Image: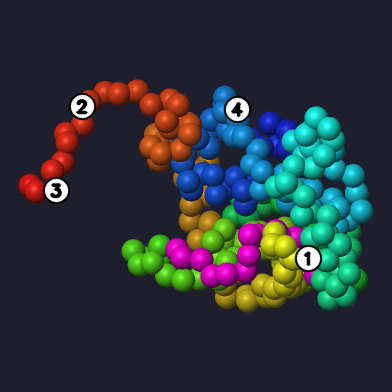
């Protein structure tokens, strides 16, 4: 594949990021990945993550969104160099986050075309490492089964599913077992570090099974065989909303 992020690649291949988009709002996902009439804005957090990853790897990252007209880093990105230096100086972090950088993999999960990009894969050690930046390592509140539940920060974005996909595609590609880790750094001043072991076979298998149960629905959506659901709240739904009825006002007093 010549361009991992090309329209053709995004239409053909499912990824962890794209799967999340389909679960969030089918109408927006279709407009983004199939008809290509919608393009979401690149967030500051995404740019910050790419900038940090490049600095850590000793690579250039040129993005006009990083600097003002004077060539100075915007304050929201100013801590990235310190974050990278902190990680580079830590022996355990550096050991785990090492190997081949930015490896693109393509394969199949339950007959569906999938792709992923590995931050690091170390064939000699037999492990995969994904770099993550986050505000801090404090627990988050999530709605689970209708209840507000405090969970670890990495559950908020379900990094278990991402690591399950990376592990599956790597093992398909190279024909050997790989362990999976996340090396994380916070955006605090000074930054905090952690290396997380995601080698829980039951949880990884559960994530793949849960995802597999929804892949056929996504395929039918892409093929136009089912009616797309709209979340009604995202930017795409708001921008394409057309009124068809008058909403009845509800009174708290009955």
Cβ atoms under marks 4 and 3 closer than 8 Å:
no
- Closest to the camera, between mark 2 and mark 4, is 2
Q: Residue at x 9, y 48 (%)?
A: 253
- Closest to the camera, between mark 2 and mark 3, is 3
Cβ atoms under marks 4 and 1 closer than 8 Å:
no
- What residue is pinned by disc 3? 252
Q: Residue at x 57, y 28 (%)?
A: 38
Which of the two labelled residues, at mark 4 and mark 1, occupies the earlier sequence position? Answer: 4
Cβ atoms under marks 2 and 3 closer than 8 Å:
no
- In the image, 164 versus 53, the foreground residue is 53
- Under circle 1, the secondary element is strand
Residue 62: percent from left, percent from top: 84, 38
- In the image, 94 versus 86, the foreground residue is 86
- What residue is pinned by disc 2? 246
- Under circle 3, the secondary element is loop
Residue 176's place in the image compared with 58, above or below, is below
Dividing the picture into quadrants, the one containing residue 193 is bottom right
Residue 242: percent from left, percent from top: 35, 23
Which of the two labelled residues, at mark 2 and mark 4, occupies the earlier sequence position? Answer: 4
Which of the two labelled residues, at mark 3 and mark 1, occupies the earlier sequence position? Answer: 1
Label 2 and label 4: CA atoms lie apart by 31 Å
Q: Residue at x 75, y 42 (%)?
A: 74
Q: Name the disc covering residue 128, or none.
A: 1
Label 3 and label 1: CA atoms lie apart by 54 Å
| Residue 105 appears in the rendering | no
């Amino acid at each position: 594949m010549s361009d991992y992020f090309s329209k053709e690649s995004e239409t053909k291949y499912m990824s962890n990021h794209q799967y999340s988009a389909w679960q969030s709002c089918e109408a927006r996902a279709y407009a983004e990945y199939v008809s290509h009439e919608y393009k979401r804005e690149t967030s500051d957090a995404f740019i910050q993550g790419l900038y940090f990853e490049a600095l850590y790897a000793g690579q250039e990252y040129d993005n006009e969104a990083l600097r003002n007209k004077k060539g100075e880093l915007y304050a929201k990105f100013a801590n990235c160099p310190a974050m990278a230096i902190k990680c580079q100086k830590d022996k355990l972090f550096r050991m785990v986050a090492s190997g081949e950088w930015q490896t693109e993999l393509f394969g199949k999960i339950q007959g569906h075309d999938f792709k992923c990009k590995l931050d690091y894969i170390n064939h000699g050690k037999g492990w995969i490492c994904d770099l993550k930046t986050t505000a801090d390592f404090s627990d988050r509140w999530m709605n689970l089964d209708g209840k507000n539940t405090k969970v670890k920060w990495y559950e908020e974005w379900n990094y278990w599913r991402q690591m399950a996909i990376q592990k599956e595609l790597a093992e398909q590609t190279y024909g050997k077992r790989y362990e999976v880790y996340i090396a994380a750094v916070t955006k605090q001043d000074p930054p905090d570090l952690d290396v997380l072991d995601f080698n829980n076979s039951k949880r990884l298998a559960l994530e793949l099974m849960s995802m597999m149960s929804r892949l056929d629905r996504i395929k039918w959506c892409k093929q136009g065989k089912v009616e797309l659901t709209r979340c009604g709240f995202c930017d795409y739904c708001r921008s394409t909303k057309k009124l068809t009825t008058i909403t009845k006002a509800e009174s708290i007093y009955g």
